[in-house]
Amino acid sequence: MEGGSLEQTLQDGKLYRQLNSLIVAHLRDNNLTQAATAVATATLTPLNVEAPPNKLLELVAKGLAVEKDEIQRGVSTSTVYDAGTLAYGSVPASRATRVDFSAMQDAKGSSKSFGKHETRKLSEHKNVARCARFSPDGRFVATGSADTSIKLFEVSKVKQMMLPDAKDGPIRPVIRTFYDHMQPINDLDFHPQSTVLISGAKDRTIKFFDFSKATAKRAFRVIQDTHNVRSVSFHPSGDFLIAGTDHPIAHLYDINTFQCYLSANPPEIGVNGAINQVRYSSTGGMYVTASKDGAIRVWDGVTSSCVRSIVSAHGMAEATSASFTKDQRFVLSCGKDSTVKLWEIGTGRLVKQYIGATHTQLRCQAVFNDTEEFVLSIDEPSNEIVIWDALTAEKVAKWSSNHDGPPRWIEHSSTEAAFISCGTDRSVRFWKEVL
């Protein structure tokens, strides 16, 4: 990504917002209310957006006239937006290697080597760095802190900063800092299509930040929940978000109306059922919750019915994280019993167990790398990052985290060999493979 990529991305975002506004206004003004509402919901555009009458028709007519004139004069047609450049939210092709989890239980043979990585301290919050999330396209990464702030980094600037022969002076990878929460940030997520970042916090709110606006410091929309918001996850369509809170049932929100929905027939859940993490599957057909009662539960993404309960997945200890494999057949979970486990959704069967990392205090995560060949987590006593071969479950690497104290959070990019670690020492570190 070139140095001007942020500006290009923000310009692209502005153009899309203008186009979406014109489409919504055109449909609404022509009494196509249902279609206008659908587009408004999908694009986070207000249904009552203002636009001059017939402005979209006028612009289309002018554009067609210009195109016709250029064709007659033999001039190649041009576009304001270069379609060859990925827009925000467009996910680039991932690296070719992908684990076949269907053969997971029969995996034998030697383990793969995890590539050597270099690391760099990016920034420091004023209190514990509690969480991090990459954007779907891998261009940005955000971190949230106990100091109530959110920092947004541009990954291309991070890489530029890590170059040994950088000659352009000091590089500042932090491109936005948001302040709008009253209590510590618990989790973050990026909208799949729009330049919108959401945060869930202990102040019982979910806040929406537009990071295309350089001067914006505060949220432009707020959902007031009834509980401490521990985790948030956007539906892949961008129309809904799911929130895990101190309540045992996840809260599903329509992001246009902010109406909250709960499962009509939830399973029996005890008093210690607060949700530590919630994540959608790649298609949104399911979501998974990891709870303080040690259970992993898989829910239907449409009906919100619980389709699989793995009670005591981590014994009597808290389940601290859970996420789907890309093929949506397995769930990777982590718990305060110092285990990382892979579960088959169809049967609820334990397929693999990754051991050798102790985590009993922090709400740490276990994550796949971008190709799902490896699993990463934290060893608290030694302050190390532990890596296993996903198929053989053999520990293949153990690296010093370079934090002063164990990292609280680890998050891997879904598009490349890079990850972020957040520490109780307040620092944020970026890791990337040395090629």
Image (tube, rainbow, N blue to C red):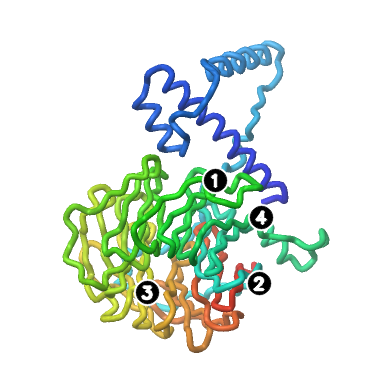
Q: CA distance from mark 3 to mark 1?
A: 30 Å
Residue 195, numbered circle: 1
N-term-proximal mark, 1 vs 2: 2
Type of amino acid at the residue the image marks with label 1: Thr
Kindly state the secondary structure of the residue where label 3 is placed. Answer: strand
Name the residue beneath numbered marker 3: 334
Q: CA distance from mark 4 to mark 2?
A: 16 Å
N-term-proximal mark, 1 vs 4: 4
Q: Is residue 144 above or below residue 15?
A: below
Name the residue beneath numbered marker 2: 121
N-term-proximal mark, 3 vs 1: 1
Q: Nearer the viewer, residue 148 or 35?
A: 148
Type of amino acid at the residue the image marks with label 3: Cys
Marks 1 and 2 in Cβ contact (< 8 Å): no
Q: Nearer the viewer, residue 99 or 344?
A: 344
Kindly state the secondary structure of the residue where label 2 is placed. Answer: strand
Q: Nearer the viewer, mark 4 or mark 2?
A: 4
Residue located at (35% from left, 77% from top): 335
Badge 4: residue crowd in 10 Å (few <14, some 14–19, many ≥20) = some
N-term-proximal mark, 3 vs 2: 2
Instruction: Indicate the position of residue 405 as horizontal and vertical percent values.
Output: 55, 83
Q: Nearer the viewer, residue 44 or 279?
A: 44
Residue 296 in which image quadrant: bottom left
Residue 175, numbered circle: 4
Type of amino acid at the residue the image marks with label 2: Lys
Residue 314, numbered circle: none
Instruction: Indicate the position of residue 161 as horizontal and vertical percent values.
Output: 72, 63
